[in-house]
Image: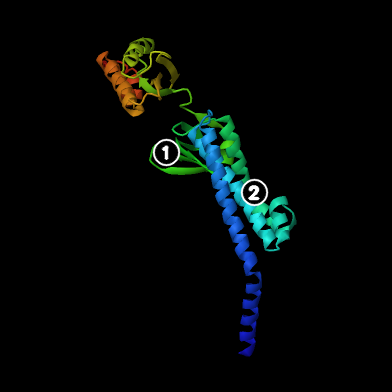
Amino acid sequence: MERIFTLIETSIEAILVILPQIIAALFVLVGIFYLGRLSGNLLLKFMKKSELSATHQKFFRKLVIGIFLIIGISIALNILNLKAASMGLLTGGGITALALGIAFKDIGENILAGVYMAFSKPFTVGDLIATGSFEGTVKDVELRHTHIRTYEGSDIFIPNAKIFSDALVNYTRDGLRRIAFTIGIDYGDDAKNACILLEPAVRAVNKVLADPAAVVAINGFTPQYVELKVYYWVNTFDKDSNIWDIKNGVMDICRTTLADHGYIFSSNVSTANVLSVPDPVKVVRGE
C-alpha cells in the first residue's frame, strides 16, 4: 500500500515540475490558433476583392488556419521538451512520423487536390457535376472533400483526390445543358417525316432554347421499332427553368404530335406490327 502511495506522490511531483511548461504550451497553442483565425479572416477580406468564388475563399481560410495549427502544435511540443516528436511532425522523419505520414497520406492528397481545384476552378457551388459513378449539385468544397447532393436528395462527400484523378463532367459551367431521349416508331411509318414533324414541335416548348436548336434524328434500328432521338438545350442559369417540367413538356408534345399524325410508337410497337400477314390459302378438294 505504501508503495502505491509513493508512486502517486512521485507522479504528482513530476506533474508539478512540468506544469508550468504544460500551461505555457497550452497558451502558445491557443494563441497561435487564434492568430491563424485572424490571419484567415484577413485573407478572406482580401480574397473577396479577387475573382475567387466564395467556396474557394472559405477553402483557403481553413487551409491557413490548419497551417497555423500545425505550427502551434510543433512549438508546443518543443516547449514540452518533445523535440523529436516536433521534428518528426515537421520533417516527416522517424518511425512515428512515418506512421503518421502513412495514416494521413490520403488527407494530404485531398488537401493538395482541393488547392489545385481552387485555382483551376472546374466547378463551384451550385454547379451540376458528374464524377465516377456520382452525379449531383455541388453544395460545398471542404479541405478534404466536396459535398454534392443527388437528384434523390442523398448527400455524398467525395474525396477531392478522387475528383482530381477521375474524369469530371460539369453540366452547368456555361449555363447550357443538352437533354436527350429516344422514341420508337413502327417500321411501316415514315421515320424521316417524323423527324420533320417533331423538330418544330420541340422548339416551340417553353424554355427550350432556340440556339442551339433542337434536333430530331434517326438513331438506330431495333427488332421491334425504328429509334428516333430527340435533342434539345436548356439554360441552367435561368432560375425560372425547371429541367423536369421542360422534359415533361417536350416528351408530351412529341407523344401528341406523333399520335395526331397516326404514328404507332413506343410500347405500342411490336413484331406483330412489323410483319405482314399472308393471305389465307384456299384448298379445293377434287372429286
Task: Examine the image and state in which quarter residue 189 appears.
Answer: top left
Tag 1's secondary structure? loop
Give how far apart the Cα atoms at labels 2 and 1 are.
28 Å
Taking depth in this image into account, of 236 and 190 the one nearest to the observer is 236
Amino acid type at circle 1 is Thr
Q: Position of residue 287 (x, y in %)?
A: 25, 16
Q: Could you say which disc has been placed on residue 150 in the image?
A: 1
Evaluate whether residue 54 shows in this view: yes
The colouring scheme, among rainbow, by chain, secondary structure or one colour, is: rainbow
In this rendering, the answer to whether 202 lies above or below 94 is above
| Left or right position of 206 against 28 | left
In this rendering, the answer to whether 130 lies above or below 213 is below
Amino acid type at circle 2 is Lys
Evaluate whether residue 287 shows in this view: no
| Left or right position of 111 against 99 | left
Q: Could you say which disc has been placed on residue 105 in the image?
A: 2
Q: Residue at x 63, y 46 (%)?
A: 108
Q: Residue at x 46, y 34 (%)?
A: 125
